Image (tube, coloured by chain):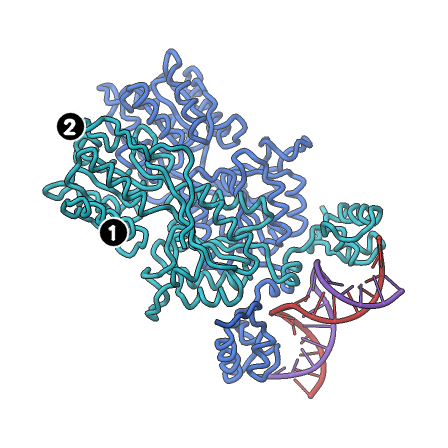
Chain colours: A cyan, B blue, C purple, D red
Amino acid sequence: MLKRVAAPSAHDVARLAGVSQAAVSRAFTPGASISKAMKEKVLRAAQTLGYRPNLIARSLIKGQSGIVGVIIGNPTDSFFMAALDALSKRLSRAGKHILIVITELGAPADEHVEDLLEYRVDALLLMAAGISSNLSDQCRKEGIPVLFFCRRPDGADGSANGKGRRGAHADDSFSVSGNDREGTRQIAGHLLQQGYRNLGFLGGPAESPTSRDRESAFTAYVKAQGLPPPVRVVGAYHRDGAVRAAREILSLSPRPDAVFCVNDFVAMTLIDVARHEFGLEIGREIGVAGFDDRPMASWPTFDLTTYSQPVDTMIDQAAEILLASPDCGRPVQIVVDGVLQLRGSTRRGLADAPERPSRPKATRGKSGKQTVK
Amino acid sequence: MLKRVAAPSAHDVARLAGVSQAAVSRAFTPGASISKAMKEKVLRAAQTLGYRPNLIARSLIKGQSGIVGVIIGNPTDSFFMAALDALSKRLSRAGKHILIVITELGAPADEHVEDLLEYRVDALLLMAAGISSNLSDQCRKEGIPVLFFCRRPDGADGSANGKGRRGAHADDSFSVSGNDREGTRQIAGHLLQQGYRNLGFLGGPAESPTSRDRESAFTAYVKAQGLPPPVRVVGAYHRDGAVRAAREILSLSPRPDAVFCVNDFVAMTLIDVARHEFGLEIGREIGVAGFDDRPMASWPTFDLTTYSQPVDTMIDQAAEILLASPDCGRPVQIVVDGVLQLRGSTRRGLADAPERPSRPKATRGKSGKQTVK
DNA sequence: GTGAAAGCGCTAACAT
DNA sequence: ATGTTAGCGCTTTCAC
């Protein structure tokens, strides 16, 4: 019923308890030198007033906010949301918090990074988003680590405000990502082993660095086997674009007999379209593989062969960097291995190929990790 | 190459520009009384120093942070992630930011709310999460609006730390939610009209308020038609629990000929299991309806009948409350109407029922809104 | 229009 | 162990 409008301050508590305001501060500072009696007295007063220390004020003094800024460039993809989920829980345990910004799908993140910087975030995590090297430099100068999650920081993305500068260079920043190269190779190898010969690649938008990486690894591997390079179709990370691209690649003649998709979302879209618009039997008439191993990939409905990006491991790595870097430290690029998940979507079911290939690499227990550079 | 560790302050800028520090402040305050010349001089100096106003300091003075706290209790559900996405974009445009916490699935949010309160968030949005009425009271007293998104605030949830207090009461707080009652009625009506007679309800966890609401509305409607009450199976919002529940309801004898699921996720899981484990043809052998109208519901793969929760409209409403309430104002409960989406998963395809029912209510353009109380 | 000075709520030396 | 005193970086009177 009380119509108080301002939260009680340490001063209020001090007055009520009849002690100095500093004493209140100490009562709320773990390991401060304060007597048991005093502490209890303060805590009691604080309790009755409903006092809560003001972290804004604390941040101002300490010069660090306990907040890490996170920018998500592709919120539609459940992989990034799962990563956000894991990160939030991980940072919560460390008493840190997340200030989050979700950008439009292809939009540059610079502007939002500036916003976050004004709040003096202790660190920055960029998911599926890039920033100009200029900004990245500034962050480093101010001691704010910038961590690229699942994206090489070396620009070539739709970079900053048209001024034509390139994005941040790889060696300058932290990064954690899945093993695009190895995963792609394993998938390509599996496809060929299954007897598929006329391969295709269904990508994301043309500018997507991830899509480019996976495509080039795929193409390189196929060529190295002495086969003609796979056809490629540019796609998108949103449903409409992915559907359009799926139709396009399925309408090709000759139609590829197996398609490696840039991620599970696109792969599931392809399956959806192939089945219901083209009447194709997945696996036998067209092989489909994805990337990420999102939970739905293992649903019988999709039964999608894919290479996992172990989000929890990756977030653990990311959190370690974010937390244990009061002053940046040496930039590190971390690549986390996944596991090839063999499923029905690449089961050709022909006599000349083994039903269930026995690749030793697949289905190994937990995924390992590997630090590059 | 410079090893600066501290960000430049307004004072630094003032010195460089040869003006007072107050002038710097004014240069960065829209509509402050400052001459053009002065402003430019300051801005130039700020530019060369890479100065960024410290919002932490500003917050301390102004008594408001420009930050709204968001707690998400069910991050697996793409509906809430979509809501987060929309909210972030909406608040960004208003210059506000989001401090986010994602809790364990069933966990109480109180502890996290306290965290956010220490950062002096201007408002609180709770998605699929509840708090004790005690805490809710405190917030109101301090002028921090609490908005429940898609959950009645009136407790009965796994409420606070075992102290047995009930959750916040409905009239005390803000809330924005979809029209559970109306949507459920429309779905039930449609099911009956299609000729399904042996209905079932596949819920979320027993404590979920949303699940309870939809179940009771469903049961009430069916009973009101003079039919026996539908069977119900308690489910979960995670895959494993949902699969288990799906198997359970499909194993019943007699098996229901149509199942209304608490949301699209559960409904899609049911379809997955019914098709691949029970070999049932969706629609003809078993009708399935969901709730939410998540994008995937309209994929041919699922073709799921459902009632929409218009996330954008809902978030607009929420944002309006969050932004336009410097000091709470009168609590408001908002219910946003959705639209019944008729799809193949409830097409029985029998002669005695129309293939495509012509319910005038369905497929109307945009969804409206309705303010309760 | 501009500068000087007083805080916002807290922490961190200093004293005692 | 406790109180006193400076600030953290900014906004906001208040003079001029």
Tell me what residue is drawn at x 45 percent, y 34 percent.
B180
Q: Position of residue A121 (x, y in %)?
A: 54, 59
Tell me what residue is drawn at x 59 percent, y 36 percent.
B108
Q: Is residue A197 above or below residue A113?
A: above
Q: Is residue B127 above or below residue B210?
A: below
Question: In the rendered image, which quarter is residue B81 located in?
Answer: top left
Residue A291 numbered mark, or none: none
Q: Position of residue A95 (x, y in %)?
A: 60, 48
Q: Compute the Cα span from label 1 to label 2.
A: 29 Å
Chain at numbered mark 2: A
Q: Circles 1 and 2: CB distance less than 8 Å? A: no
**The one of A223 and A63 positioned closer to us in this rendering:** A223
Q: Position of residue B257 (x, y in %)?
A: 34, 18
**The one of A366 and A238 positioned closer to us in this rendering:** A366
**The one of B241 and A26 positioned closer to us in this rendering:** A26
Tell me what residue is drawn at x 28 percent, y 19 percent.
B279
Classed neighbour count for the residue bearing mark 1: other residues with Cα under 10 Å, few (<14), some (14–19), many (≥20): some
Residue tagged 1: A216
Residue tagged 2: A352
**The one of B130 and A363 positioned closer to us in this rendering:** A363
Q: Secondary structure at mark 2?
A: loop
Q: The disc labelled 1 sits on which kind of residue?
A: Ser
* Residue B369 visible in the snapshot: no
Please name which of the two marks, 1 or 2, marks the residue nearer to the observer: 2
Total numbered circles: 2
Drawn side of residue A133 relative to residue B24, left or right: left
Work out whether mark 1 precedes mark 2 in sequence or the reverse, and give the earlier one: 1
* Residue A49 visible in the snapshot: yes
Q: Is residue B234 above or below residue A84?
A: above
Tell me what residue is drawn at x 26 percent, y 38 percent.
A289
If the image is split into quadrants, where does the C terminus of chain B sit?
top right
Chain at numbered mark 1: A
